[in-house]
Amino acid sequence: MSHEVEDETTVNESFSVTVPAAIRREAGVEAGDKLRWHVDEDGQLSVTLVKQQYGAFSELEPVDIGEPTDAADDHDLIAGDY
C-alpha cells in the first residue's frame, strides 16, 4: 500500500456494508475476494482481506494427448467403463 487511507461506512438494515471505493482501491479488493472479520477480547474489530484463490491448475497449458476428450460427457465414467 502506498499510504494510509481511512473512511467509514454505514451498516444498513440488513446488516450489509459497502467497502468504500478509496479503501477498495488502496487495498486491492476485487469481486470474489472475502473479508475476514475478527473481534478480540477487548471488543476491537479488525478486517483482513482474503484474496480469491484460483484453481491450482488455472495457469497450466493444456496438453494434446492425441485423442478428443469431453469432460461434460466423460466425468461420470468409471475407469475401464468406456
Image: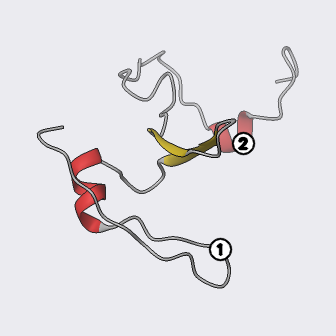
- Comparing labels 1 and 2, the label whose residue is closer to the camera: 1
Nearer to us in this view, 10 or 36: 10
- How many residues crowd mark 2 within 10 Å: few (<14), some (14–19), many (20+)? few
Q: Residue furthest left?
A: 2
The residue shown at (54%, 30%) is: 68
Nearer to us in this view, 38 or 1: 38
Q: Is residue 35 above or below residue 71?
A: below
Task: Say which quadrant the N terminus sits in.
Answer: top left
Q: Residue furthest front?
A: 42
Please give the residue where the numbered disc 2 appears in the rendered image.
73
* Residue 81 at x, y percent in the picture: 88, 22
Q: Is residue 55 above or below residue 50?
A: above
Whole-angstrom CA distance, mark 1 to mark 2, is 43 Å
Nearer to us in this view, 61 or 39: 39
Contact flag, marks 1 and 2 (Cβ < 8 Å)? no
Query: Label 2 sits on what residue type?
Result: Asp
* Residue 75 at x, y percent in the picture: 75, 34
The residue shown at (50%, 22%) is: 56
* Residue 5 at x, y percent in the picture: 22, 53
Query: Label 1 sits on what residue type?
Result: Phe
Please tell me in which quadrant of the rendered image residue 31 appears. Answer: bottom left
* Residue 46 at x, y percent in the picture: 52, 43
Element under disc 1:
loop
Please give the residue where the numbered disc 1 appears in the rendered image.
15
Element under disc 2:
helix
Q: N-terminal of the two: label 1 or label 2?
A: 1
Nearer to us in this view, 70 or 49: 49
- How many residues crowd mark 1 within 10 Å: few (<14), some (14–19), many (20+)? few
Q: Is residue 56 above or below residue 38?
A: above
Chosen colour scheme: secondary structure
Is 8 left or right of 68, judged from the image as shown?
Answer: left
Q: Which dot marks residue 52?
A: none
